[in-house]
Amino acid sequence: MTRRSLELIAAADVIYYDRLIPPDALEGARPEADLVYVGKEPGRPGLGQAEINRRLVESGRAGLRTVRLKGGDPFLFGRGAEEAEALREAGLEFEVVPGVTAGVAASAYAGIPVTHRDQSAAVTFATGHEDPEQPELKLDLERLARTPGTIVFYMGLGKLGANAEALVRGGRPSTEPVAVIERGTTPEQRVVTGTIETIADRVSEAGLRPPALVVVGEVVSARDRLAWFERRPLFGRSVVVTRARDRASVLAGKLREVGAEAIELPVSRTELIEAEDARVDGPLERFAAEGFDLVCFTSPTGVSAFFGLLEGRGLDSRSFAGAEIAAIGPSTARALSARGLRADHLPERFVAEGMIKALESVPMEGRKVLMARAEEGRDLLPDTLAGRGAEVTVMPVYRTVPEPLSDRDLTRASEADFVTFTSASSVHNFVAAGADPARFGPEVATIGPVTSAAAREAGFTVRVEAERHDLDGLVESIQAVGS
């Protein structure tokens, strides 16, 4: 999706959307925005085009910021021109935001370049199914067959056999390669290849269904060399991400890189602790005035929140002068590095037990230790260091607040291949949101032993536990089981 489309979705009062948009395309909409489904599906009744036009005009006249969201490009077999004409006739102004059409995008995801220097210098986009109510057909397939280059048919599955016969009558070789791409660019993508003569039978045998795209031409032969999407290790697998809303996209991005469909269903959000809170104000005053011998961070969010509090007092990384720094894992260490600080202590296992072991050789008697962490963090690390003689100050810099899930969200989660948990709180919040561990189908994947223990206590069966307790380790462990 383009940046402009995301900006308009975020500002919209009402969004009329089709069935072929990405599943998460509406996530950027405001909670109070009115989301109206106006999609059309083959063989099922839906809103007619005249009614869609009427609603768009009605919303515009009411002064609402209105988005008509379509899959692909609105002016390429998207009926966007008809809707724009209705708005102009009503005296309403509009903006058209071009998209990436399926003829280009789905072909590329199937490893098929629609043009190639050695094979095709032109590409024709055509409808494979014209409106039967038109007084006469506008597309002469036999004439089109004589046009050199690649032909891409939209909506061509229903008349695949008849269209193939027309192309042969027009002079296309019956042995010319053809590909049919079902649900292109999505984790459900399927591609069947053949020739003009064989493709209809092959598609029938494979059971392909709309939406599908038909590509005709020598460029289809490039798929054997250039197919890439289906080669990714988690292609075709769906994974639920339950991390807090402001952190979910990082894990989701890593999963998409290896081909998975990442379903973001945050069960919590992060709230920063106010600077006026006595648990924050006192330690910050002490940090600025006299400093600490050791400062421990247990998450990247803790680093970000702590530096936000420092900046609120006009302080920066120079305030750490003379202090040693401990980070619970590489992600936390990278967050520190981005602010000019290097972690002196980094455990091999990215849990409290690992941090305890990493600090075994560090003298603690009489040392002043500051621990910046979540409000609901475990007490194992501070209690252990205090037991060794350290003067430990626990400073909660953020809290995790539960977020509800809708029935639709829970249904999507139950149909996935995996659900991921990156903390014990994410397990508790997921169950509190309505998930039933006793009737839960997806495999459960956790970031480490503490989270696994919480999942088992809640009634889940843990299939995957990350060997390295960070996001990369979690993704790698899912790959080992799911690919």
Image (tube, grey):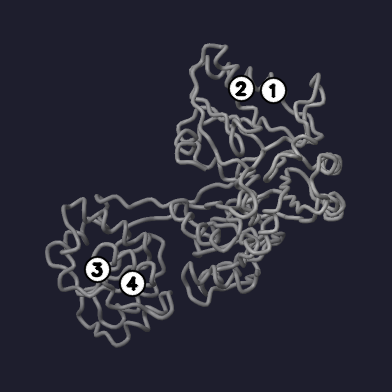
Q: Earlier in the sequence, mark 1 or mark 4?
A: 1
Q: Earlier in the sequence, mark 3 or mark 4?
A: 4
Tag 2 and tag 1, C-beta contact below 8 Å: yes
| Rendered position, 132 above or below 164 | above
The amino acid at mark 3 is Leu
Q: Which residue is mark 2?
A: 83
Mark pair 3, 1: CA separation = 59 Å
Visible residue check, residue 216: yes
Crowd tier of the residue under label 3, counting other residues whose Cα lies within 10 Å: few below 14, some 14–19, many 20 or above: some
Crowd tier of the residue under label 2, counting other residues whose Cα lies within 10 Å: few below 14, some 14–19, many 20 or above: many
Q: Which residue is mark 3?
A: 341
In which image quadrant can residue 51 be found? top right
Front position among marks 1 and 4? 1
Q: Earlier in the sequence, mark 2 or mark 4?
A: 2
Between 109 and 12, the one lying in front of the other is: 109
Instruction: Measuring from the top left, give residue 245's x and y in whole percent.
Output: 47, 51
| Left/right of residue 360 with respect to residue 123 in the rendered view | left
| Residue at the image point whose x is 22% and y is 62% from the top | 283
Crowd tier of the residue under label 4, counting other residues whose Cα lies within 10 Å: few below 14, some 14–19, many 20 or above: many
In which image quadrant can residue 282 be found? bottom left
| Rendered position, 200 above or below 372 | above
Front position among marks 3 and 4? 3
Element at label 4: strand
Mark pair 1, 4: CA separation = 58 Å
Front position among marks 2 and 4? 2
Mark pair 2, 1: CA separation = 8 Å
Q: Which residue is mark 1?
A: 49
Q: Which residue is mark 4?
A: 327
